[in-house]
Amino acid sequence: MSEVGVTPGKIMLVGIGPGHVEHMTARARAAIAEADTIIGYVTYIKLVADLIEGKEVIRKSMTEELDRAIEALARAREGKKVALISSGDAGVYGMAGPTFEVLFQAGWRPYEGEDGDIEVEIVPGVSALNSCAALVGAPLTHDFCAISLSDLLTPWPTIARRLDAAAAADFVVALYNPKSGRRTRQIVEAQRLFLRHRAPDTPVAIVKSAYRRREQIVFTTLDQMAEAEIGMLSTVLIGNSNTFVRHGLMVTPRGYANKYDLDQGGETREGEKRGRSLSTGLLGWLEALQAEHAEGADFATLAARHRLPVDYIQATLLAPLGASVVEEIHESEA
């Protein structure tokens, strides 16, 4: 892929974390130091200004992601080492994806040290959901997901389905790209979808510019969140049904209270065992499901009772999953 007679270059997809040098990995700083060319969105370039003196710097605007990737490929073909920087992690709404798309379109294959292909290295960084969570407490201790509200590249019905599914499944959710000067209604629609499944007083934390000069943290609730100041530099963390805020900290319990009596020095509750599935885990649930079905509950009734798809309930009970799984788990816990 490189020009004839030119040593193959290298593209380093660098995640710089929240932006403060203290939160960049040592490898991220080293990658920037060894690069001949730095490419990135103008705001991200400013965040690493102290590290790029004397280097070729190519600044691009917000919507020029593909241009950044094409520029990185062109410089690497000239034999240069290129640091293509993203805030947070390059693989989380960052430049890793579009860069690989451009590379594959150009016929690139992974570098193996024998041919002339450009080497590509991904340098991971702290994503916004991690940095924002660290500032507000421990909201991501249990299952969570991230959803972008940007409909510049993703159809809104797709985004809405994801929001509704995540809300119904009781995930803690980190909303990226929640609002901009032109996209003001998306956060309102997200709120409406979540209120279909979550209590109005569900805790919400809004973090703007985490670990940067204009950092701002706001705690609010689901029914009030759309009224808060939110922009493109904000990340919105919506708690699940167990998330709480206490002493200015947002915490999502992992579930230890289901198994251990925290008032009794962490002793296991009756019927529970350390290191074993809950009595209401897969084994216990399967046994209960079979008992309910044997007592006359049909598939639809069981699906509604357990809030699961009818076909999943049917397949679990009929063929031959239910009995075999129960037997296997019994044997493993014997």
Image (cartoon, rainbow, N blue to C red):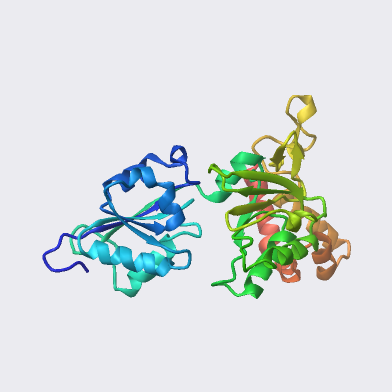
- Residue 330 drawn at (x, y percent): 68, 47
Q: Which of 238 and 307 is in front in this view?
A: 238
- For the C terminus, the image quarter is top right
Number of numbered discs present? 0
Tell me the quarter of the picture where residue 69 sits. bottom left
The residue under the point 41% across, 60% down is 96
Is residue 317 shown to the viewer in this render? no
The residue under the point 37% across, 65% down is 68
Extreme residue in the right direction: 296
Q: Nearer the viewer, residue 289 or 157?
A: 157
Tell me the quarter of the picture where residue 200 sits. bottom right
* In this rendering, position of residue 250 left or right of residue 19: right
The residue under the point 33% across, 68% down is 70
- Residue 19 drawn at (x, y percent): 47, 46
* In this rendering, position of residue 334 left or right of residue 261: left
- Residue 300 drawn at (x, y percent): 82, 70
Q: Nearer the viewer, residue 285 or 191?
A: 191
- Residue 115's place in the image compared with 121, above or below, is below
- Residue 242's place in the image compared with 298, above or below, is above
- Residue 310 drawn at (x, y percent): 76, 70
- Residue 241's place in the image compared with 104, above or below, is above
The residue under the point 60% across, 57% down is 146
Is residue 228 shown to the viewer in this render? yes
- For the N terminus, the image quarter is bottom left
* In this rendering, position of residue 36 left or right of residue 199: left
Extreme residue in the left direction: 5
Q: Which of 115 and 33 is in front in this view?
A: 33
